[in-house]
Image (cartoon, rainbow, N blue to C red):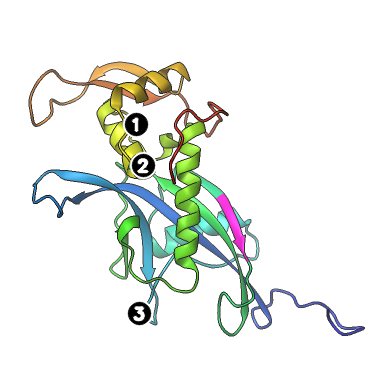
Amino acid sequence: MPAAGSEPPIADGTTLRVEVLTVVFQIRVAPDSGSGSDIDSPSLCVLLSRSVDDVWTLPGGGVGAAETLSASARRLVADSLDVREIAHLEQLSVFSDPRRVPAVRTIASTYMGLVPSDAAATPPEAAGWFAVDALPPLAFDHTEIVDAARHRLAAKLSYTNIAFALAPARFPMSALSEIYCAALGYPVDTTNLLRILSRRAVVVATGTVGKTGRSGGRPPALYAFAEKELRVTDEFATLRPPM
């Protein structure tokens, strides 16, 4: 407790600092180096920035004087990393361990942001996308924050339509099942996924077809998400992640 008559510390940057950190996810295609195949496989990737101390960190920084926390989160990602197409942003948690950052005590308000797989999201040289299963060493508790966001995403894929923020505007169901697979970390059957999402009125047929795949055959039917805002679709979570 503070001494009698003294004021509690405020976030003035010298005794207490408040920062915003954002875990930005995108399903990105990366070479399948493990199989020796030239077929690309999508992975859940997170956006990281290299600090002046040559350490990888989540994008973030201080809160703007006239900004909400979420507005600061979007600005920091857009201005420093030139990633502007965040389709969904939600507050993740507050990390407030007094020892999480040396020197000045720093409280982090964290967010999860999702970028569609077809969005142009090329960060500057001092930043990059990394598969969540192959992260470099991260600063402070940033690995823990990424893990928290990954589990949040996996859980919400089960009972909401949150995949709208990871998918392109139109897609064959095989591509959407790959997005679910990459985000959940286990195989997702395309036919079963279509049945579940159609029953929940999450995806709708567009009446158009896409390009024929590498193996030939009929052009696939294209689908789209019925809504572009988050909603709960099944509180009983038919797709239960094993994480």
Q: Is residue 218 left or right of residue 221?
A: left
State the quadrant of the N terminus: bottom right
Q: Which mark is residue 27?
A: none
Residue type, numbered disc 1: Ala
Q: Residue at x 32, y 33 (%)?
A: 188
Image height of 47 relative to 221, above or below? below
Q: Residue at x 32, y 57 (%)?
A: 133
Per the picture, the main secondary structure of the magenta-coloured stretch is strand
Residue pointed to by mark 1: 169
- The local crowd at label 1, few if under 14, some if 14 to 19, many if 20 or more residues have their Cα within 10 Å, is some
- Residue 7's image quarter? bottom right
- Circle nearer the N terminus (1, 3): 3
Secondary structure type for disc 3: loop
Task: Report x, y in % for residue 114.
Answer: 43, 46
Q: Gap in Å between the C-alphas at discs 1 and 2? A: 8 Å
- Residue 195's image quarter? top left
- Mark toward the viewer: 1 or 3: 3
Residue pointed to by mark 3: 54
Residue pointed to by mark 2: 116
* Residue 11 in view (yes/no): yes
